Amino acid sequence: MDKNLKNQLPGLRSEPGFQPGKKDVEAPGVGKFKRSGHLTDQILKYHPKKQLTLWDSLTTSTKQKIQADSVEVKSIVDGIRLSPSEQKVIDSLTKLLHEKSQNKNPEDSTYYTGNAGAELVQYGDTETQAPKIAFTIYELTKEYKGGDYVAGKDIENVKKILQELDSRRYLIKYIETTHQKGGGRTERTIETYSSLLQVIELTETEYSGTDIELSKTEETVIVLNPIFRRQIDSKYLLLPNDINQRTIEAYGSHNISEITLRLRDYLVREHSSRRFTPEISIEKLYYTLSDKWMKESRKKKVREYTEKALQVCKDIGILKSYKIETGAKGEKKIVFTLDKDWK
């Protein structure tokens, strides 16, 4: 870690963005899978200040859903905040969605809809397909563990995380942009208050003609929030199939910090947008990685965790180097150099 970074006090933030490249400019091969760019943007959202006018800006329908959920208005923020364990489960589900979907033809209605028949759901002010995937809990837990040995307690832990994600609602607000020929564009504002997934546990038992039990398969079916596939043909991240395993090994533990996962995803988002030398003010970076600790004036802790996160990103191969510079307005910024050929 550059020793200067330890002494930097971050500059001002702006909203994190994502600029998609050309449509399917690099289709994922056997070694990579797609994750929705909109989903990643919502996960990486941060709020250095209280959103005083957020409630007033919401639609009546959204307000009613929040009130029905008995949630305090002052605690509402837009975006998807996940614990490190939840983030790993979402990453694993994203990979399973890719593997268990028709992912070659974006023009087909089955594109990224899973292997259990998509469901038509209300999404903002429109109806759209929600992907549905079927798998065993063992299969998901194996991915969650990065391919390591799966014990009974690991399976129970993943089940608990799924149940918690099922019960929690998120306020999701963003704009979907569709570019037209001739330079025009269409923008659709999405606003929804919903869970990221709905879990349905099924047990399938096969019997012989004489009612003798032949086999029993415990299978989980999950309906994913539509954000997992919205515009995934043009706005997406490409992640290596072994990203969980790489991150676990580079971190030296399964208990990966939130800051490490957020820095990794920030850099992957830049890489997928073909921005190989991105730069960001130190303050904005720190808020992106942990707005909670920054608002608690725990900058030293953010810096310490960022040091390790930078090393992890080097070890997984996406980050070649970085340097600290002074911006035009005198603020300190960090300039990353990413590996263009990262796979």
Image (cartoon, rainbow, N blue to C red):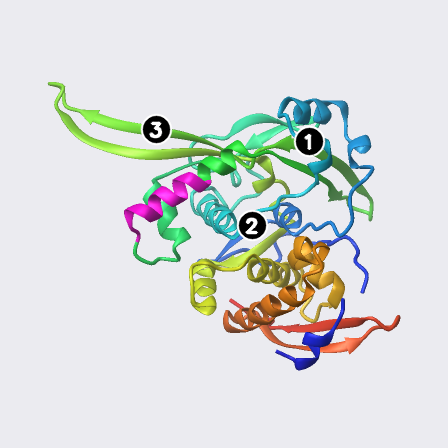
Q: Which label sits on residue 49?
A: none
* Residue 4 image offset from top left, x and y in percent: 70, 80
As for residue 179 lying within the magenta part, the answer is no
**Residue under numbered circle 2:** 35
Q: Residue furthest bottom?
A: 3
* Residue 79 image offset from top left, x and y in percent: 67, 43
As for residue 156 lying within the magenta part, the answer is yes
Front position in the image: 102 or 285: 285
Which quadrant of the view contains residue 121?
top right
Secondary element under disc 1, as helix, strand or loop, is loop
Residue 102 in sight: yes
Inspect the image, locate mark 3, and give the three-letter code of the amino acid beneath it. Answer: Leu
Main secondary structure of the magenta stretch: helix
**Residue under numbered circle 3:** 202
Front position in the image: 241 or 173: 173
Label 3 Cα crowd, 10 Å radius (few <14 / some 14-19 / many 20+): few
Which quadrant of the view contains residue 228?
top right
Inspect the image, locate mark 1, and give the three-letter code of the amino acid beneath it. Answer: Glu
**Residue under numbered circle 1:** 72
Secondary element under disc 2, as helix, strand or loop, is strand
Label 1 Cα crowd, 10 Å radius (few <14 / some 14-19 / many 20+): few
Which stretch appears magenta? 150-161
